[in-house]
Amino acid sequence: MLKKIFFTIILLLICGSFFYYFFSTQFLITPVAQEKRTLTPDESFIISFPKDVDARYFHKISIDPHGDAEVTLKSDRKHLVIKPHTVWQPGKTYTISLPRARTGSFAPIEPSLFSFTIVPHPQVTATLPHNNDHDVIIDIEDPIAIDFDHSTEDFFIDFSLEPFIPLTYQNNEAKTQFELLPEEALAEDTTYNLTIHSRAKDAPQSEARQIHHLSFSTPAPPPAPLTPEELANVRIQNAQRNTTAQITDGKYIDINLSDQIMTTFENGRPINSYLVSSGKAGMNTPIGTHQIYNKHPRPWSNKYGLYMPNWMAITSDGLYGIHELPEWPGGYKEGEDHLGTPVSHGCVRLGVGPSQSVYDWAEIGTPVIVY
């Protein structure tokens, strides 16, 4: 009888120990999620456990909203990796529900909820030109500029211009700022619509989403009976006839901002006249008597990210000069459509042929009079 009582007590102690182990919070295993809770669309979410867990447990987890995700237990059986088969939906918040379960040694795992948010589609914060701007001129020094609220690194951004013209673009290192330039000249007196779409990398094309729309119009042609070429020739001929030399000894360069004409003189005699584009309003070319301080056949401008062929500095600080139409790193060069109109950022721009002629003719120290 005593032996029976003894074994009963032993059995109760063993059962009590198992009951305590299985149900006591002292042995409860608590999953821990990674600290990073804002993910890119293709990034995995990882949950860690202090002890190894049973792989069958992960067939019971749920994801809300329902996501097409792959759940993998790493070889150490302590890290649960939840990875999208394609991509998570940008801007969505996902909740991972872990049910109650046990480790490989039967310790209880606490049921848990975890959430993470996916980086949203980039949003446009600023554009140049502004929406519905009129008389817009797009050129190499004034491209279409687009600013985004965060990096577009994890997204495909598509820019579409209608009426259709292919676009060349460049962006900053952070991929938050883009500059777009049409590969063909924009038509005059035309309304253009720029549509911007975004989709996460690896997402199907069907998931592309429109994130911005920009509309602007180009100037109407001037009401003049002469063609631009004829008008330019008239302006050049008038300049050669009517410009009076201000220096009669040696070479000097005469720049008339009102007429947008440059005339080269030698010993008081006009050599040639050319159409130029000086600084636009607010970025005016400095008036006064200057000189050629330095020359370079094709320097690089860090400020604008452009080449400035046939550069001739006319101020000692090198901020202003005479140069050929600027050139993008890819080789794109603006046409001569805007010569004769003040559209630059302060420099004096010449056409391709004239710039070479003036560069070869002028010497360092040659006076430059701007008025």
Image: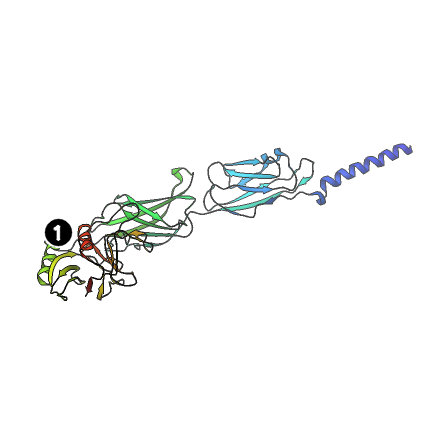
Residue that sits furthest to the left in the current view? 241
Residue 144 lies, in percent from the top left, at 30, 51
Residue that sits furthest to the right in the current view? 1
| Most foreground residue, 213 or 247 | 247
- What's under tag 1, amino acid-wise? Glu
Horizontal side, residue 58 vs residue 66: left or right:
right
- How many callouts does the rendering have? 1
Residue 218 lies, in percent from the top left, at 23, 52
Residue occupying image coordinates x 58% and y 42%: 47
Which of the 4 image quadrants contains residue 289? bottom left
Horizontal side, residue 261 vs residue 31: left or right:
left
Horizontal side, residue 145 vs residue 39: left or right:
left
Residue named by callout 1: 229
Q: Secondary structure at mark 1?
A: helix
Residue 271 lies, in percent from the top left, at 12, 58
On-image quarter of the C terminus: bottom left
Chosen colour scheme: rainbow
Residue 178 lies, in percent from the top left, at 35, 50
Measured along the vertical axis of the image, is residue 285 above or below residue 58?
Answer: below
| Most foreground residue, 218 or 64 | 218
| Most foreground residue, 310 or 193 | 310
On-image quarter of the N terminus: top right
Question: Label 1 neighbourhood size at 10 Å, few (<14), some (14-19), many (20+)?
Answer: few
